[in-house]
Image (cartoon, rainbow, N blue to C red):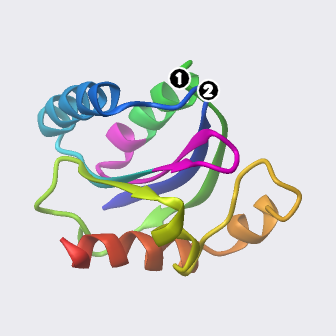
Amino acid sequence: MHYIIYVSQAKKPMDTAALEALLSLSRQWNTAQGLTGMLIYRYSTDAENGYFIQMLEGGEREVRALYEKIRRDKRHHTVLTLGEGEIDARMFSEWAMGFKNVDDTLFAGLPGHARIGEASFDPAAFQHSNVEALKLLKFFHDAT
């Protein structure tokens, strides 16, 4: 089973309707392709911007193809791969695309928290290990 974890910054904040439309299409596509995963969206009131972290899992060809499509999506930028590799079993087997919309208050206290685009954000630190990203995704998975 192949996986990719990435983060990105939304070009403009996404409201509930935009997020629901994105999820609806994603879930249909993922179901058809045998993909599962988790998407977290956070709107930062300080930066007045939205951020994503997502894990995709499934067959390597399908995961890579979807990730390339995501990288070209004009709704976000600064797409950074946090981790990629093989896992024995799916983490999110029950979700074509699990989703959480979180705010700064909740997000700031969680492991793996960082603000893309700010001086304190160090993409190299994230790219060397996906442990913190996995902890964050697992926290939201287990909280549902």
Which residue is rendered at x = 56% and y = 22% of the image? 72
Q: In terms of image quadrants, where is residue 55?
A: bottom left
User: Decide: marks 2, 1 in contact (CB < 8 A)?
Assistant: yes
Helix, strand or loop under label 2: loop
Between 85 and 76, which is closer to the camera in this rendering?
76
Q: x, y percentage for residue 144? A: 18, 71
Q: x, y percentage for residue 38? A: 32, 56
Which residue is rendered at x = 29% and y = 49% of the image? 59
Q: Amino acid at mark 1?
A: Arg
Residue 59, disc: none
Mark 1, residue position:
75
Q: Please report the bounds of the magenta region as a residue range.
A: 42-63
Residue 9 to residue 84: above or below: above
Residue 125 appears left or right of 19:
right
**Residue 99 shows up from this direction:** yes
Label 1 neighbour load within 10 Å: few <14, some 14-19, many 20+? some
The span from disc 2 to disc 1 (Cα, nearest Å) is 6 Å
Helix, strand or loop under label 1: loop
Residue 8 appears left or right of 140:
right
Mark 2, residue position:
11
Residue sitting at the far top: 74
